[in-house]
Amino acid sequence: MHFDTVSEAIAPLIDDELIDDVLFQVKSGKEATLFCCRGARRAQAEFVAVKVYKPQQFRSFRNDSMYQAGRVILNARDARAAAKRTRHGREVKSSLWTNSEYETLRVLYRAGAAVPRPIGHSQGAIAMEWIGDPDAPAPQLKDVNLSRSDAQACFEQLLAEIELWLACNIVHGDLSAYNLLYDGQRLVAIDFPQASDPRFNANAYELLARDLGNVCRFFARWGVASEPDALAADLWDRFLRSEL
Ligand SMILES: Nc1ncnc2c1ncn2[C@@H]1O[C@H](COP(=O)(O)OP(=O)(O)OP(=O)(O)O)[C@@H](O)[C@H]1O
Ligand SMILES: [Mg+2]
């Protein structure tokens, strides 16, 4: 990623005394580059994960509209800019993703969900709890060998998490064995920029069912039997009833 983009996004985190050094780059993905940083005074952590978003135009295609449906841009000037393809418009859309991922982490962490503790953010980056060892991130679930009983336990933990997210009005929307880190005992869910609010997004049920489909298909490999459609319908039903 362009050096200027990274340093512009990271400098405010240093000024805010959240990090004081970038230790190494973990990974450059579709939409962001992840760095392991040394935590500064206000982070209250030795290591901090910093996710720097790629400017919109360099991100690989993702159907924004399915996720953005129902998301409200409160400021009229920003709303007009986001609708146009101006530079300011691109910045608005890009900070929409950053703010939205940070806000989602805050809500979920406060509710007790197994997500990285949010530490701070700038326009182009979020800082959060580092999940892993000093020299390497925790493995993605897709790369972990699970015994049948660990798989069953992880699967059940994950269903409880998905239900807790829903109770917080959040559907992940990109859940898979790529976006779950295994820290040795439990799963930690990451990568929430596209999360939707099921009260406002008309595609939320579809996204929830797809998340469950991905999860169930993955765990079937380790001998966990489940019925994703029935699970999605049941979770949704309970969500709707709690809304009454
Ligand atoms: N809090 C964290 N602690 C440690 N490692 C992390 C953390 N968050 C993310 N990572 C690592 O960085 C990778 C990319 O993060 P994330 O999935 O949020 O971004 P992404 O741009 O969507 O990447 P991808 O295209 O690979 O999904 C993760 O797969 C994981 O290995
Ligand atoms: Mg990811």
Image (cartoon, grey):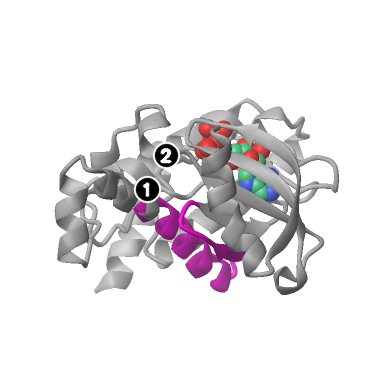
Residue holding disc 2: 55
Q: Quadrant of residue 128?
A: bottom right
Residue 113 image offset from top left, x and y in percent: 58, 63
- Which of the two residues, 150 or 183, is positioned nearer the viewer here? 183
Q: Is residue 138 above or below residue 225?
A: below
Answer whether residue 116 is magenta in the image: yes
Q: Residue at x 29, y 57 (%)?
A: 198
Where's residue 106, x and y in %? 52, 68
Amino acid beneath label 1: Ser
Tag 1 residue: 94
Residue at 37% from the left image edge and 48% from the top image edge? 94
Q: What stretch of residues is rendered in magenta?
A: 96-124
At x 45% / y 64%, what residue is drawn? 103
Relative depth, front residue between 81 and 129? 81
Whether residue 116 is visible to the viewer of this picture, yes or no, is no
In the displayed structure, 159 sits above or below 58; it is below
Q: Which residue of the protein is positioned furthest toward the right in this rendering? A: 134
Q: Quadrant of residue 178?
A: top right
Q: Earlier in the sequence, mark 1 or mark 2?
A: 2
Cβ at disc 2 under 8 Å from ligand 1: no
Which quadrant would the N terminus be assigned to in this image? top right
Q: State yes or no: discs 1 and 2 in contact (Cβ < 8 Å).
A: yes
Residue 111 place in picture, x, y as percent: 54, 72
| Residue 164 lies within the magenta run | no
State left or right for residue 196 relative to residue 37.
left
Instruction: Say which element carries label 2.
Output: loop
- Asked if 205 appears above or below 26 in the picture, the reply is below
Residue at x 71%, y 28% (from the top left corner): 143
Secondary-structure class at tag 1: helix
Please rate how many residues cluster around mark 2, counting C-alpha atoms within 10 Å: few if below 14, some from 14 to 19, many from 20. some
